[in-house]
Amino acid sequence: MYDATLAETVTIRGDGGDEIEAYLARPMSQGPFGGVVVIHHMPGYDAPTKEIARRFAEHGYNALMPNLYHRDAPGASPDDAAAAARAQGGVPDARLIGDVAGAAAHLRALTSSNGKVGVIGYCSGGRQSVLAACSLPLDAAVDCYGAFVTSAPPEGRPLKVGPIKHLIKDLSCPLLGLFGADDQYPSPEQVNELEEELKAQGKTYEFHSYEGAGHAFFAVNRTAYRPEAAVDGWEKIFTWFGRYLA
């Protein structure tokens, strides 16, 4: 099989028809391939998250990461754009849903698409992955330590979002959750609360929590990185998407 990938900056139609920047990584062969919308973490549309998109392409997926901060600071560095977004309270939920919808439509329109699209997010993106899966017709979702799904941020935090537990009844696809047992946001108690709601609503899900891991244990460029948890987590992600997107 021809073994090559292409990764490039593209323009997609996001919420309200706005043109926004996105990063597309895909295999350079006919496919057909499943699609993955990669939702970046709070630090933004940065090099480590682009690497994640390329990793999906290397494993046979068309991966697209929309720049959720494009409107807040067009052309700015990831750090400056993230600061601008935080100053405004983060990405509004309605805009996030529109941007993910646009990304999913872009993936489905690729000639190498098999028509299936999943979503994955990290940190704030984990919550947004759940939000998207409760708001859009998707085929699979992964929540990597998404905070504030069942509770609001503590007072004094700049993030202006609310809990979305009440939306779980509308979850459109199977959900994989990967969490650190030492994390504070989400805490093990908050993860358990989400799991109980998924059970109550009869949803298909699978949760895994890793002892000795806290928040951001997938982040290879941060001291929070936990290799054993990350390696096992990646295996579970590819198994999950292989089951529902291939």
Image (tube, rainbow, N blue to C red):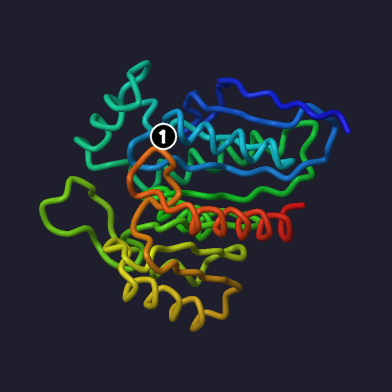
Specify the farthest residue to the top: 75
Residue 185 located left or right of residue 173: left
**Total labels drawn:** 1
Q: Residue at x 55, y 64 (%)?
A: 176
Specify the farthest residue to the left: 156
Q: In the displayed structure, would residue 171 be above or below residue 189?
A: above
Specify the farthest residue to the bottom: 200
Q: Image quadrant of residue 162?
A: bottom left
Q: Secondary structure at mark 1?
A: loop
* Residue 9 in the image, given as x and y percentages of width and height: 56, 20
Q: Residue at x 24, y 62 (%)?
A: 152
Q: Residue at x 43, y 63 (%)?
A: 179
Residue 30 located left or right of residue 24: right
Q: In the displayed structure, would residue 39 be above or below residue 228?
A: above
* Depth order, front residue of 101/157: 157
* Depth order, front residue of 29/129: 29
* Residue 166 in the image, given as x and y percentages of width and height: 39, 70
Give the class, few, some or many, for how many residues have Cα within 10 Å of label 1's Cα (few <14, many ≥20): many
Q: Image quadrant of residue 110?
A: top right
* Residue 32 in the image, given as x and y percentages of width and height: 83, 40
Q: In the displayed structure, would residue 80 be above or below residue 161?
A: above
Q: Image quadrant of residue 173?
A: bottom right
Q: Amino acid at mark 1?
A: Leu
Q: Say which residue label 1 marks.
A: 68
The N terminus lies in which quarter of the figure?
A: top right
* Depth order, front residue of 161/239: 239
Residue 224 located left or right of residue 26: left
Q: Residue at x 48, y 25 (%)?
A: 20
* Depth order, front residue of 166/222: 222
